[in-house]
Amino acid sequence: MTNYLFQLKMNFKRIMLRNKAFFFFDMMLPTIFYLLYTKILTVGIPTSTLPTWNENYLISMMVYSCMLGGIITTSNTLLDDQTSHFNLFIALKPISKIQYYSAMAIVFLCLNLISSLIICLVGIWVNHISISLPLLAVLILINLIGTIPLILLGALTALAKNPNTVNLLNNLIVFPLAIISGLWWPIQMMPTWLQKIGKIMPTYQLSLLDQNLLHKSTINFSAILIIFAWFIAIALLFFVIGNIQKRKGLSIQ
Amino acid sequence: MTSILEISHLNKVYEKKSILSDINLKITSGSVTALIGANGAGKTTLINSILDLIPHDSGEVRFLAGNDWKKITGVMMQDNISIHRITVQEIIQLSRSYFKYSLSYQQLLKISGLENQQKHFMSKLSGGQKRRLAFALALAGDPQILFLDEPTVGMDSNARNDFWQKIDQLRQHGKTIIVTSHYLEELENIADRFLILQNSTIVFDGTIQELRNMSGNGVVEFDSQLSEKIFISLTDVISINQVGHHFQIVTNNTNSLMLELTNYLQALENLQIKQTNLDTLLLNYKENTHD
């Protein structure tokens, strides 16, 4: 337990506290987008629908922030650990790989928690959004749990090993996923065929789950099932590719 | 003596090329084993296979400690670890935290020789400093068995001397050490067993004296205007290396060779007798096996 706490503390230091530029970027980008969409790009939107618009964008940007942290931060950190041989160091120590991965996942979840809180505070302070504190806490909690498949997706892209390939994969996943999931613009603005694809994405389902809870006070179980199915599919892919790489002697798992 | 590690019929094929072929090995407790061979001979692959970092195709690696082998093993790999935004102090403490019984922080810091760099980030250390830190990290759990893969690469001569002195102390404390190095002269005084890995298999397994008996235990050097043919015909000559008028003859029996050379004494200058070093032995071994 002592070594787990020590590893956790070290991860907080190296990923968050001592990486200020990255931390700022990771935290601020979704907040800047939120302000852009709710304060500048609102021309022509009737005043009566503005509060709903602001609430929906709050949800969208919380999910977007979790996606950035989940995919990009995870893959970059794992890639960094490969190039610095930290994963080799861990592989030779009498600890399980679960300890290494879970101590890192906790930090990523905390990063997402902080970025979600910042967006919420901005939403409340700038756009005067009125969401009760318990509901806000539940929404943030749902987002954190919903981020787990995205963290796994980040771990999956890190298996590509080559930094250029990993960056390319991240860009190919993150930005198209944000667009087709309706996180940047309403999904209704897209062609029907693209909407169909967008609606099965985990990020759309996560945002749908939040919006149903916020506007209708209902839990969308089909969204939970779809997110869980994504988690299983990505986890399977991760273990299959990881094992193939280990068998070929390409990776230290 | 107890075997702390046993390897039997280990095979590894990568991209249809045999990297390790039928490796059989028993490492006794308290021994210092030097694994030597040319680049690409398979030394690092063998170590990685033993440490389960890469899978082998067939064969078995068995530690006396069983599945708990990581608790009694310290490893210094060829590649330095250099985690960003982590200090020397933190990585030493982290390494210690993995073991129930570990060397103290101060002991490890002293081994690393980084007393003045405790608060420095690992990534800011020089290559030699990173090697010394890697050595200290390998010793964190006070291991019974130590794997050292090219440990002195990047170290300056003082650091290398210090390093081998520490290895000698560890040997005296009964630690089992498996080491690879391209600085063969460093291994001569420390290792009590030599394994030559060549063409994916172990072609020699024995002491340096046994290697000398096979590949020549002495070198006679001199300058002479005489032809090489004269010296080739002498008995006990294993190999001759001629550069201009300078001759270097490797022999199994320096006394008998010297006796024969007395016939040509007037034509020889700067005559010297040397004991063969490991580099020459390895070179001769390769030449003999290629013949």
Image: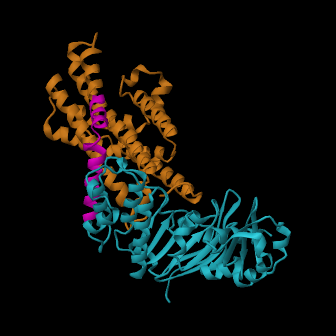
Chain colours: A orange, B cyan
Figure check: B275 above or below A230: below
Identify the magenta region. Answer: A1-30
Where does the image place residue B121, in percent across and percent down from the top left?
31, 49
Q: Pick whichever, B289 or B264, lies toward us.
A: B264
Name the residue located 28 percent from the left edge and 53 percent from the top edge.
B117
- Figure quadrant of residue B237: bottom right
Viewed as shown, does residue B110 lie left or right of B168? left
Q: Residue furthest bottom?
A: B1
Q: Main secondary structure of the magenta part?
A: helix
Figure check: B45 above or below B258: above
Viewed as shown, does residue B215 lie left or right of A14? right
Name the residue located 27 percent from the left edge and 37 percent from the top edge.
A20
Viewed as shown, does residue B193 lie left or right of B202? left
Q: Is residue A24 magenta?
A: yes
Q: Is residue B262 visible?
A: yes
Viewed as shown, does residue A208 lie left or right of B40? left
Q: Pick whichever, B268 or A60, lies toward us.
A: B268
Where does the image place residue A21, in percent across and percent down from the top left?
29, 34
Q: Pick whichever, A204 or B128, lies toward us.
A: B128
Name the residue located 70 percent from the left edge and 80 percent from the top edge.
B214
